């Protein structure tokens, strides 16, 4: 699995601020609808449901919200860089500014977990995060993530 298979250039955005998780999930739902044709309400509900089980802020300014949706046929990703970090109830209590969202089919099982692990490894790379934080162009952010993922797979 490679991030290029799940992350389309149009699914990479820079947002000024989200304000709250609820507002961020609404933004993610709108992106999913625009880029992948997924019902925004399903995305919002799925992300909120998963978040209610425990926060997906993994530390170091990174969050990996994810959800399994009935209507999906394949795993898709959305990456958002926030210009103003927000509280995400992260494990280290630090605000979050890099958000990689995964949306997977309800029955994706192992494939979903493998993809989540790949995204997690990529986002744990300090050099990758430094590059992501130093850029505001979505095309550049997409290229950084794809290149990092390709290095991980090699």
Image (tube, grey):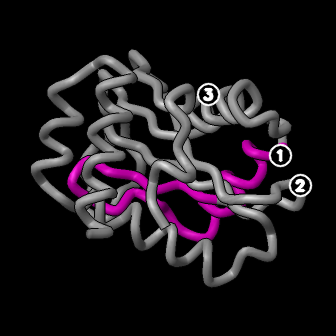
Q: Residue furthest right?
A: 71
Q: Report the side of 102 relative to 92 (left or right).
A: right
Q: Secondary structure at mark 3?
A: helix
Tell me the residue that label 2 is attached to.
71
Q: Earlier in the sequence, mark 1 or mark 3?
A: 3
Tell me the residue that label 1 is attached to.
42
Q: Residue at x 73, y 36 (%)?
A: 36
Picture quadrant where residue 67 is located: bottom right
Tell me the residue that label 3 is attached to.
27
Position of residue 138 measured from the top left corner of the image (x, y, whole percent)? 38, 22
Screen quadrant of the C terminus: bottom left
Which one is nearer the viewer's eye here, 20 or 118?
Answer: 118
- Judge whether 85 appears above or below 117 on screen: above
Disc 3 to disc 2, C-alpha distance: 19 Å
**Mark in the foreground, 2 or 1:** 2
- Judge whether 21 appears above or below 93 on screen: above
Disc 1 to disc 3, C-alpha distance: 13 Å
Label 2 crowding class (10 Å Cα cut-off): few <14, some 14-19, many 20+?
few
Which one is nearer the viewer's eye here, 40 or 94?
Answer: 40
**Mark in the foreground, 3 or 2:** 2
Position of residue 58 measured from the top left corner of the image (x, y, whole percent)? 34, 62
Position of residue 101 measured from the top left corner of the image (x, y, whole percent)? 53, 49
Q: Residue at x 63, y 50 (%)?
A: 76
Q: Residue at x 51, y 68 (%)?
A: 115
Q: Earlier in the sequence, mark 2 or mark 1?
A: 1
Magenta range:
42-66
Disc 2 and disc 1 in contact, CB within 8 angstroms: yes
């Amino acid at each position: 699995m490679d991030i290029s298979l799940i992350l389309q250039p149009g699914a990479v955005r820079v947002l000024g601020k989200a304000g709250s998780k609820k507002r961020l999930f609404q933004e993610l739902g709108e992106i999913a609808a625009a880029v992948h044709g997924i019902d925004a309400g399903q995305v919002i509900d799925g992300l909120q449901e998963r978040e209610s089980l425990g926060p997906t802020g993994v530390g170091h300014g990174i969050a990996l919200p994810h959800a399994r949706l009935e209507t999906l046929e394949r795993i898709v990703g959305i990456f958002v860089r926030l210009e103003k970090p927000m509280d995400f109830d992260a494990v280290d209590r630090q605000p979050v500014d890099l958000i990689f969202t995964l949306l997977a089919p309800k029955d994706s099982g192992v494939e979903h977990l493998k993809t989540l692990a790949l995204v997690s490894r990529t986002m744990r790379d300090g050099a990758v995060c430094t590059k992501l934080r130093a850029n505001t162009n979505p095309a550049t952010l997409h290229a950084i993530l794809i290149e990092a993922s390709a290095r991980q797979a090699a």
